[in-house]
Image (spheres, helix red, strand yellow):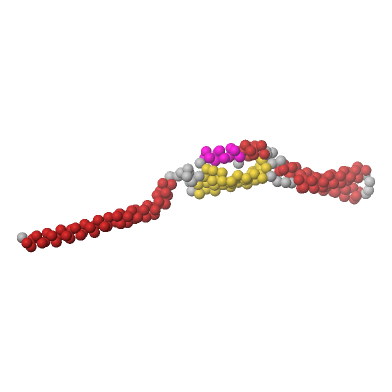
Amino acid sequence: EKACIAAGVKVCQVMGSSVNSYGEDQVSGYLNLRAEPKWLEKFRGAVSTDAANAGGEVTSNTVSTEDLTQYIIDTSARLEAKQALRDRIRALLESRQGTLNDVLAAERALADVQGEIDSMTASLDAAKARVAMSALSISYASDPETSYSMWKPLTEAFKSFGRTSMQSLADAVNFVARTWPFFILGLIVLAILRVWWMGRRKKA
């Protein structure tokens, strides 16, 4: 946005912008502007590079042009008609024909026509400037993999708490499943040894 403002309104115009922050390390936003094609081409390349260097990414980058050909043709024709009317009114005033009321009415009409001419001229110039420029819409966001804040380790720990707990429980179940046959076998061996030992004591 600063680059567009620095370039001047004849080269670039900011149409809209927004920045949204989610915590300390998550940022997203968009930028809409209209600029000359050559300047816009350089700007698009610089934006992608700057976003990557800042640990973010450009999520969308769209350029469009506006077809105002018919509007310019129609406005130019109406402007020429108004200019011709203005010239006729001026000629009438210069001839000094008619009554005082006629002259006053002609002066008011001239002022009205001149106001319309000025407005149409400004609109026509703006339309021609818009045709000479391209519209750019950019959306960008910080990269969650590279962004970092002081709370991120704790946040990640809470996120992995459930997964870690379930994994530990699964490991315990697997351990029991692997060892219980040996436990049963050990009990059987102990029972046999006990019976054998008791038999020896009775004989003694």
The foreground one among 104 and 54 is: 54
Question: For the C terminus, which image quadrant?
Answer: bottom left
The foreground one among 134 and 195 is: 195
Question: For the N terminus, which image quadrant?
Answer: top right
Which residues, given as a range, are shown in magenta? 44-54
Vertical side of 198 occupied by 92: above or below: above
Does 93 sit left or right of 115 as displayed? right
Q: Residue at x 51, y 41 (%)?
A: 55
The foreground one among 10 and 199 is: 199
Residue 200 location, x and y as percent?
Answer: 9, 60
Q: Residue at x 72, y 43 (%)?
A: 131
Chief SS of the magenta region = helix
Does 72 sit left or right of 97 as displayed? left
Vertical side of 125 occupied by 188: above or below: below
User: Does 47 appear in magenta?
Assistant: yes
User: Farthest residue toward the right?
Assistant: 97
Residue 25 location, x and y as percent?
Answer: 48, 45
Vertical side of 74 occupied by 201: above or below: below
Residue 37 location, x and y as percent?
Answer: 67, 39
Q: Residue at x 69, y 41 (%)?
A: 133
User: Does 191 appear in magenta?
Assistant: no
Does 99 sit left or right of 158 as displayed? right
User: Farthest residue toward the bottom?
Assistant: 202
Which image quadrant for residue 132?
top right
Q: Is residue 65 visible?
A: yes
Q: Is residue 111 visible?
A: no
